[in-house]
Amino acid sequence: MKVKGAVNIFNEYVFSDFEKQLFVIIADEAKKLNYPSYIVGGYVRDKLLLRDNKKDIDFVCIGSGIELALNVAKKLGKNIHVSVFKNFGTAHFKYNGIDLEFVGARKESYNRDSRKPVVENGTLEDDQNRRDFTMNALAISLNENNYGEIIDPFHGISDIENKIIRTPLDPVITFSDDPLRMMRAIRFATELHFIIEEKTFNGIKESAERINIISPERITDELNKIILSDIPSKGFYLLHESGLLKYIFPEMIDLVGVEMQDGRGHKDNFYHTLEVLDNISLNTNDLWLRWAAVLHDIAKPATKRYFEKQGWAFHGHEVVGSRMVKGIFKRMRLPLDAKMKFVEKMVLLHLRPISLTKENVTDSAIRRLLFDAGEDIESLMLLCKADITTKNRLKVKRYSDNFEMVRQKLKDVEEHDKIQNFQPPVSGELIMKTFNVNPGRKVGLIKDHIKEAILDGIIPNEYEAAYQLMLKKGAELGLTPQHK
Ligand code: ATP
Ligand code: MG
């Protein structure tokens, strides 16, 4: 690390001209107000880590953060809208796509049963004390006498150097004041590949139950960031080990462990799920596909049965699992829209591609898979591939060979039959017009019959063949075409 003690960070690290000019303007405005001011928080941490973080910068001043924000915004341009949060003493505005947040230095104390802090004005030191981790409590001075100096009362620089997450105060106090910090510790450990210092981790273990006072939205924000990390399993292991997981995601706890009967066990589904999640994370940054990996086997505990002949089985876990998605999404305040539907669909279909083996990869099975997966077929294939976690090399080879064969077949069949964006070649309107009937059961039966015939390869996915089949099925149902 290049910064030790009283050196000017602006001479040691790379800052864009934009950043440097912005800080000079803020320093100027703060000086006019006679407010000592500092850059604080994640921006400083990420700068020392050489991590590109241009999305938000936090400033703290000894005085009114709101007044400073208003003056800076005025200086920067006419039409900048400043959002002021009087109750929190903070103000925020966006400038050149960056979120700038200003706060007056605060001293906080918390009521044990609520998240509402009692806030008083404080010194820089008070403000640094109330921050979550030593690495997040660094401040860069914007004041004339020591411009660019890093103020590091808790040895945050050395913790960053050693990749250590540690609370500035006694961890039990820090976590009890705001239990979300426990989630943040694990999220940062996962995102930054840091280690949580032992006393701090023990503090999480001790305070884990207090996570229950935090709103699901805030917990889910952190959980999503864990899921979006390079190696998300690390976060889940820490959540489990710390005791937090059972409060925030009990369904995952049910996946832990191996049951034995007649000397036979099944695989540990917690471990397996996390392997699948890490696997898929190598190939996608899509949060919802990663969620599908988290949830793909979620119903294994609920469907587990032991059969004397075959051993352990989890029949129907994909169906039951896909029905569990909504409840989990609701509780975690995840969106109940198309994204949830996508996750449900992935969980429901996750066994389909791999269940096709050499003997039964018929065109019709492929067409049905294409029809059911639709535009999400690529995502499903990624999930399915990630799901191969067996250590048995022969099995891996067999699964992978099958998988590649399915992939090739999918391509061939789709090129030929265009099933993926299936539009019935004969519409409901045409059926009604042809037989002069109203919407109803018979129209549905005819449409279904045509669809099934196409998927089974009895007729091609074309208008003329579908029209003829419509006439035939109509006749079976006692309908006659009305000729004009
Ligand atoms: P990132 O932006 O990458 O999520 P960050 O550390 O910048 O990380 P923010 O939520 O932007 O996180 O918060 C900015 C700073 O505010 C933090 O660095 C920390 O100093 C402080 N902070 C945020 N949340 C808390 C909290 N729950 N308890 C104590 N301090 C916090
Ligand atoms: Mg930030």
Image: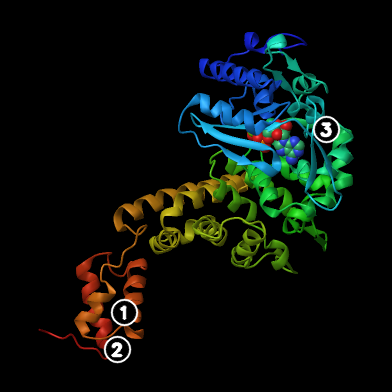
Picture quadrant of ligand 2: top right
Residue kind at label 2, given as amino acid type: Leu
Residue 140 coordinates in the image, percent (x, y): 70, 19
Foreground pick, 109 / 254: 109
- Mark 1 vs mark 3, CA separation in Å: 67 Å
Count of marks placed on residues: 3
Horizontal side, residue 423 vs residue 97: left or right: left
Work out which quarter of the rendered image holds the N terminus and state it: top right
Residue 358 visible to an observer of this rendering: yes
Reading the image, the residue beneath label 2 is 477
Reading the image, the residue beneath label 3 is 167
Residue kind at label 3, given as amino acid type: Thr
In the rendered structure, which disc, 2 or 1, sits on the residue that comes first in sequence?
1
Reading the image, the residue beneath label 1 is 446
Report the residue at 84% width, 31% height from top. 197
User: Residue 82, located in which quarter of the rendered image?
Assistant: top right
Instruction: Note whether 46 is above or below 230 in the view shown.
Output: above
Residue 185 visible to an observer of this rendering: no
User: Residue 173, located in which quarter of the rendered image?
Assistant: top right
Report the residue at 65% width, 57% height from top. 297
Judge: label 2 CB < 8 Å from ligand 1: no
In the rendered structure, which disc, 3 or 2, sits on the residue that comes first in sequence?
3
In the rendered structure, which disc, 1 or 3, sits on the residue that comes first in sequence?
3
